[in-house]
Image: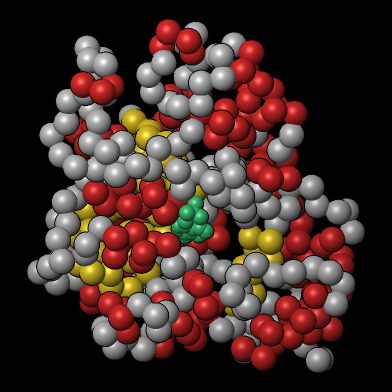
Amino acid sequence: MPGYELIGKEEQAEINKIFDEGSGVLFRHSFENIRKNSFKVKDFENKFAKKMGANYALAVSSGTAALRVALAVLDLSAEDEIITQSFTFVATVEAILESGAKPVCADIDKTLNLDPNDLKNKINSKTKAVIVVHMLGTPANLIEIKKICDENNLTLIEDTAWGCGGSLKEKALGTWGRMGAFSFDFAKTITTGEGGMVVFNNESDYTKAAAWHDHGHENNPLLPRWEDSRTGRGFNFRMTELQGAVGLAQLKKLDYIVKSQNQNKKEILKLISKLDFVSPRLVPEGSNETADALVFFTPNKEIAINCREALLKVGVSTKILPEALNWHFAKKWEHIEEITSNNDDFCQSSTILEKAVSLPIFVNMEKSMPEKIFHQLQKAIDL
Ligand SMILES: Cc1ncc(COP(=O)(O)O)c(C=O)c1O
């Protein structure tokens, strides 16, 4: 798992610099006379954009905020529909609802991400955009999905909450669509405690989002902030300098995290693939996964639950699958009328999800872990 395993003195050192070199200014704008040119959030944005190969990056207060800010660029109304996938964290749909549009969830396929065929079924004249999610760190079928979006003149946004540091055909996740939204919450590949980032290729999208996330402030360099210009409304989704400092230190660890997780995942997969009831998740060709998790399918729901129980007996937990679908599956969101009113049965998604087990992958994996997992899974079939 993620940045929280590797958090410590480097992050502390970056925070200390705010006080030692920047007079303790924790706000990303203004205070030029005392901050001695210390701009942690700005620095984090620039370095993040460069790392991802995007033209612009905007740091925000959470991954949910990143999605909301990206949607603000599209000027949506209650008539508009945004398609996302049935298996995602509820935040994706919450951001759509907050933007004023209607969420529509399409089924997933065996990548556990958006099924291009069901995406096609869900497109109609009201559809404005598609939010594809790289759930649990594996790229969605972006080639097919982007083609469908282009053919139907739809904006593609990537929910890259799980995809930071991953790529498809060597192009970073988050940069395939018009905008990519990242999360740095405490369980993500890199973390700032809470936090997020939106990446953009178009300057006009970036400019609009930057103003919207800051009450409409255009941050005109010729004006003091209290006299700043604006052309529209906004909200406050700003990141603080403290988060920016932590992000700078974490970003330097991203390659190491992704590489270690992939190695550890490979070791576990090699062993558990010997079990004939285990079949791995489908991964699009050319994927570089973040490897935050290892997902596999079992023959049925009972065996998936047995796997979790057998693992828990030795203190190994699973991650979301099979236990946390309440928060991650549209079929369970009875509290969201906009979803229930679509009367989707999500039958295809249910059939796929109920057989799936997801193992968290740690950077600092105990040496004995692959064997331990293998032995417990062996027992799961007989429970
Ligand atoms: C797929 C997905 N999207 C969005 C979010 C929201 O991110 P945050 O917790 O930073 O608001 C999460 C968080 O887990 C997520 O898993």
Residue in the picture at 67% in, 37% down: 256
Is 205 located above or below residue 147 in the figure? Answer: above
Q: Position of residue 327 (x, y in %)?
A: 51, 72
Is 339 located above or below residue 6 in the figure? Answer: below
User: Is 49 left or right of 365, judged from the image as shown?
Assistant: left
Residue nearer the viewer, 250 or 244: 244
Q: Position of residue 222 (x, y in %)?
A: 22, 12
Question: Residue 228's image quarter?
Answer: top left
Q: Does the rendering let one see residue 335?
A: yes
Is 288 located above or below residue 229 in the figure? Answer: below
Q: Position of residue 240 (x, y in %)?
A: 49, 33
Residue in the picture at 24% in, 49% down: 72
Residue nearer the viewer, 235 or 135: 235
Residue in the picture at 66% in, 21% down: 16
Residue nearer the viewer, 186 or 84: 186
User: Is 98 left or right of 47, judged from the image as shown?
Assistant: left
Q: How was this image coloured?
A: secondary structure
Q: Residue furthest front?
A: 226
